[in-house]
């Protein structure tokens, strides 16, 4: 019986990553970007961010001037690093919102 | 038909075709341009978002002369505003200009370019000087987007470019389309010939 309970606990611990497979709120980040006025030019920002190992997906919203970033599960990126990425790509960060 | 020296015409061409002088870090840009009697090709690499370097080639089928050289663009200043962007670029190119089939002279080109745009309007001014003969060229371009597309749509711009060189002035209407990483321009040269530009960002 004790072995059964132990196996069950071990099984539950191993399955937690699977149960938590939905993207956690912290893996989604919305970055308000200044200078985002041209689709052709914004492609560069999308490509540059997409090359970062921690980034799983990037989408651009020209109307609201927002870059939506989805991180690779388990990855974390702080605001300073995000700002540096956007600045390195030639744009300016107006604000960062996590979980959106 | 107005007669331009190869390099002067080439300068004007490069003025009109530099829609993306500097790309994203690690990005490549390739561009070809066709006018009735001049072909032009560019390819440049951007190690950072501040500068690029690459190749510039111009071939005149009218005069059977050419220019081949290395070009360098530098983003001197950029203003990123919530609803607009403005840029100032400096450029220089150096290479060989053929004056006959068997001879190349050293030649260099220097210039500045500044632009402002939002999602509806576009403006750009460019000035270039060719050190070979001291000729200065100026070009101004204005554009308007008849509709504002979303990210991923086919975007269209209606543009008018005024090119000035000495006492000569040309007005060139251009239609620009771009989608994803491709940009195409079609225009009508003052002498009635078609203009075609194609640009791709990698």
Image: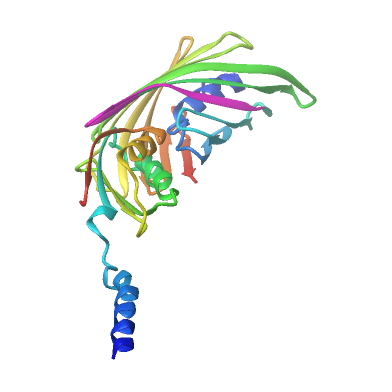
Which residue is at the far bottom?
A: A1
Considering the whole magenta stretch, tell me its main secondary structure.
strand
For the rendered model, the colour scheme is: rainbow
Q: Does the magenta stretch include residue A45?
A: no
Q: Residue at x 22, y 31 (%)?
A: B82
The residue at the far front in this view is A2
| In the rendered image, the vertical position of residue A81 relative to residue B133, given as above or below | below
Residue B176 at x, y = what percent?
A: 36, 39
- Residue at 41 percent of width and 34 percent of height: A88
Camera-side residue: B173 or B125?
B125
Q: Where is residue B100 in the image (x, y as percent from the top left)?
A: 75, 23
- State yes or no: residue B82 in magenta: yes
**B150 over B124 or under it: above or below:** below
Snapshot quadrant of residue B88: top left
Q: What stretch is highlighted in magenta?
A: B67-86
Q: Nearer the viewer, residue A92 or B157?
A: A92
Q: In this view, does A19 lie above or below A97?
A: below
* Nearest to the observer: residue A39 or residue B134: A39
Residue drawn 35% across the image and 60% down it:
A73
Residue B47, x across and y down, in percent? 53, 34
Q: Quadrant of residue A79?
A: top left
Query: In the picture provided, is A61 more to the left or to the right than B99?
Result: left
| Residue B85 visible within the image | yes
- Residue B140 seen in the current view: no
Left or right of residue B7, residue B114 in this image: left
Residue B31 location, x and y as percent? 52, 39
């Amino acid at each position: 019986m004790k072995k059964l309970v132990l196996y069950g606990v071990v099984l539950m611990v191993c399955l937690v990553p699977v149960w938590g497979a939905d993207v956690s709120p912290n893996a989604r980040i919305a970055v308000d970007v200044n200078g985002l006025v041209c689709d052709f030019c914004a492609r560069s920002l999308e490509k540059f961010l997409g090359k970062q190992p921690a980034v799983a997906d990037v989408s651009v919203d020209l109307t609201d001037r927002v870059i939506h970033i989805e991180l690779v599960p388990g990855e974390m990126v702080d605001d300073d690093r995000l700002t540096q990425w956007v600045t390195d790509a030639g744009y300016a960060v107006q604000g960062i919102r996590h979980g959106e | 038909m107005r007669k331009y020296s190869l390099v002067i015409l080439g300068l004007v061409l490069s003025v009109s075709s530099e829609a993306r002088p500097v790309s994203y870090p690690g990005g490549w840009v390739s561009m070809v341009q066709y006018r009735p009697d001049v072909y032009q090709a560019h390819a440049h690499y951007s190690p950072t978002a501040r500068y690029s370097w690459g190749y510039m080639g111009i071939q005149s089928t009218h005069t059977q002369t050419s220019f081949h050289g290395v070009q360098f663009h530098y983003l001197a200043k950029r203003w990123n505003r919530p609803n607009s962007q403005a840029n100032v670029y400096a450029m220089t190119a150096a290479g060989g200009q053929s004056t006959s089939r068997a001879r190349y002279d050293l030649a260099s080109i220097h210039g500045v370019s500044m632009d402002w745009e939002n999602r509806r309007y576009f403006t750009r001014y460019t000035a270039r000087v060719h050190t070979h003969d001291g000729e200065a060229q100026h070009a101004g371009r204005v554009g308007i987007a008849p509709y504002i597309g979303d990210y991923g749509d086919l975007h269209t711009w209606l543009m008018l470019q005024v090119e000035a060189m000495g006492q000569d002035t040309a007005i060139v209407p251009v239609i620009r389309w771009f989608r994803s990483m491709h940009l195409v321009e079609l225009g009508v040269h003052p002498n009635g010939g078609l203009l075609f530009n194609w640009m791709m960002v990698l």
